[in-house]
Image (cartoon, rainbow, N blue to C red):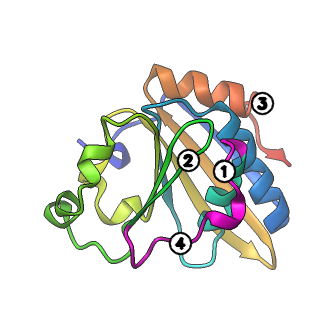
Amino acid sequence: MTASERVPESRRCILSHSANETFALGARLGQLLAPGDFVGLVGELGTGKTEFVRGVAQGAGVSAAEVSSPTFAIISAYRGRIPIYHADFFRIRDYDEAYSTGFTDLLESDGAVLVEWLNRVPRAAPRELIVLSFEDLGGEERRIQAYAYGIRYQQRLQTWIPDAGSSRL
């Protein structure tokens, strides 16, 4: 069963009004991430997924300038307070192809894993995770839906975004 077929234990809706706000939201999560954490990001091109990951990286002690979309490399690794593994499944067709990149080895690594386009290979996701869905509302405004699957991620989401209602950054 994939995360999309399950009911999340917790969810939040965040409205971001600029790329800077999206970055800041990521930075707050980056400060909280621990080894073994898994965050899936879904949304169309240009909805802010990579900008969010730049923020996460900075929050985890990595220079945001080091982060780019790993569409062609598939997986990029960054060293900070904890290692950040940033994968992009845009060009991945199926689980076997994701497996052949060495992606599954990251699931038992010493760092946090962030995967853009996780919806393309949902089988690659662990049972427990945070899924972030990015939606373009026009201009620079984005709706980011955060879904927590599992107690660990429910707690992480509560710490990251305490208010259960919609919030503005």
Question: Which of the 4 quarters of the picture holds residue 135?
Answer: bottom right
Residue tagged 3:
163
Name the magenta segment's main secondary structure. loop
Dot label at residue 62 = 1
Marks 2 and 1, how far apart at CA: 6 Å
The relative height of residue 162 versus residue 45 in the rendered view (above or below) is above
Which residue is painted at 47% across and 31% down in the image?
35
Residue 66 covered by magenta stretch: yes
Q: Are marks 3 and 2 in contact (CB under 8 Å)?
A: no
- Callout 3 amino acid: Asp
Q: Are marks 2 and 4 in contact (CB under 8 Å)?
A: no
Dot label at residue 79 = 2
Mark sitting earlier along the chain (3/2): 2
Range covered by the magenta-colored residues: 59-74
- Callout 4 amino acid: Ser
Left/right of residue 148 with respect to residue 117 in the rendered view? right
- Callout 1 amino acid: Val
> Please, what secondary structure does the residue beneath circle 3 have?
loop
Q: Are marks 3 and 4 in contact (CB under 8 Å)?
A: no
Left/right of residue 51 with respect to residue 147 in the rendered view? right
- Expressed as whole percent of the image width and height from the top left, the position of residue 125 reads 32, 46
Marks 3 and 1, how far apart at CA: 28 Å
